[in-house]
């Protein structure tokens, strides 16, 4: 055993043989995000890169984390259906009924403004 040595009756193992270092290739997901926050609500949107090295995103694949700060504990929800967000933006009756169950009129107006900004920036396409 050439990788061990005995000193004063105690055996020691050569350090390089106690472990092997393997660099694992990580499967990372990169994203870009932005937040709009008021005293009552917070809208945090993220979009995933399709190819980070080419700065390419999945088309209209976004996720909005909604936080209602009007009550304790805060209520949170996630929205990832782009068609629903577009419905809110275009005053679709069903989409507006859904959103008015979650927030007041000011919040709905702010959400619509936020959606319009995401459309203008190309984060939501239709």
Image: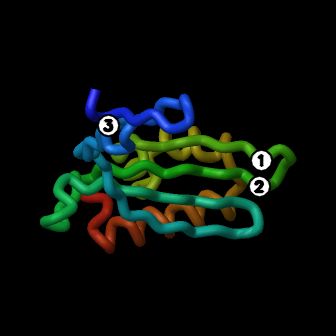
Quarter in which the N terminus is drawn: top left
Q: Earlier in the sequence, mark 1 or mark 3?
A: 3
Is 50 placed above or below 93 here? below
Query: Residue sitting at 48 percent across and 30 percent down?
Result: 11
Q: Is residue 74 left or right of residue 64?
A: right
Q: Residues within 10 Å of mark 3 (few under 14, many from 20)?
A: few
Query: Residue sitting at 20 percent across and 53 percent down?
Result: 50
19 or 107: which is nearer to us?
Answer: 19
Q: Which dot marks residue 17?
A: 3
115 or 75: which is nearer to us?
Answer: 75
Q: CA distance from mark 1 to mark 2?
A: 5 Å
User: Which residue is identified by label 2?
Assistant: 69
Q: Residues within 10 Å of mark 2 (few under 14, many from 20)?
A: some
User: Which residue is identified by label 1?
Assistant: 74
Q: CA distance from mark 1 to mark 3?
A: 53 Å
Query: Residue sitting at 77 percent across and 55 percent down?
Result: 69
Q: Position of residue 22 (x, y in %)?
A: 26, 42
Q: Earlier in the sequence, mark 2 or mark 3?
A: 3
Q: Is residue 41 left or right of residue 58?
A: right
The answer to whether marks 1 and 3 mark residues whose Cβ atoms lie closer than 8 Å is no
Q: Position of residue 39 (x, y in %)?
A: 76, 68
The answer to whether marks 1 and 2 mark residues whose Cβ atoms lie closer than 8 Å is yes
Query: Residue sitting at 49 percent across and 51 percent down?
Result: 64
Disc 1 is placed on an element classified as loop
Q: Earlier in the sequence, mark 1 or mark 2?
A: 2
Q: Which is more foreground, mark 2 or mark 3? A: 3
Disc 3 is placed on an element classified as helix
Q: Position of residue 123 (x, y in %)?
A: 31, 63
């Amino acid at each position: 055993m050439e990788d061990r040595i005995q000193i004063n009756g105690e055996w020691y193992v050569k350090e390089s043989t106690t472990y092997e270092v393997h660099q694992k290739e990580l499967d990372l997901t990169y994203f870009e995000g932005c937040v709009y926050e008021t005293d009552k609500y917070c809208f945090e949107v993220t979009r995933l890169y399709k190819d980070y090295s080419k700065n390419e995103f999945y088309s209209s694949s976004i996720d909005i984390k909604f936080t209602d700060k009007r009550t304790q504990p805060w209520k949170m929800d996630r929205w990832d259906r782009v068609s629903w967000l577009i419905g809110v933006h275009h005053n679709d009756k069903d989409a507006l009924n859904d959103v008015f169950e979650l927030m007041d009129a000011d919040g709905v107006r702010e959400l619509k403004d936020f959606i319009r900004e995401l459309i203008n920036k190309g984060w939501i396409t239709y």
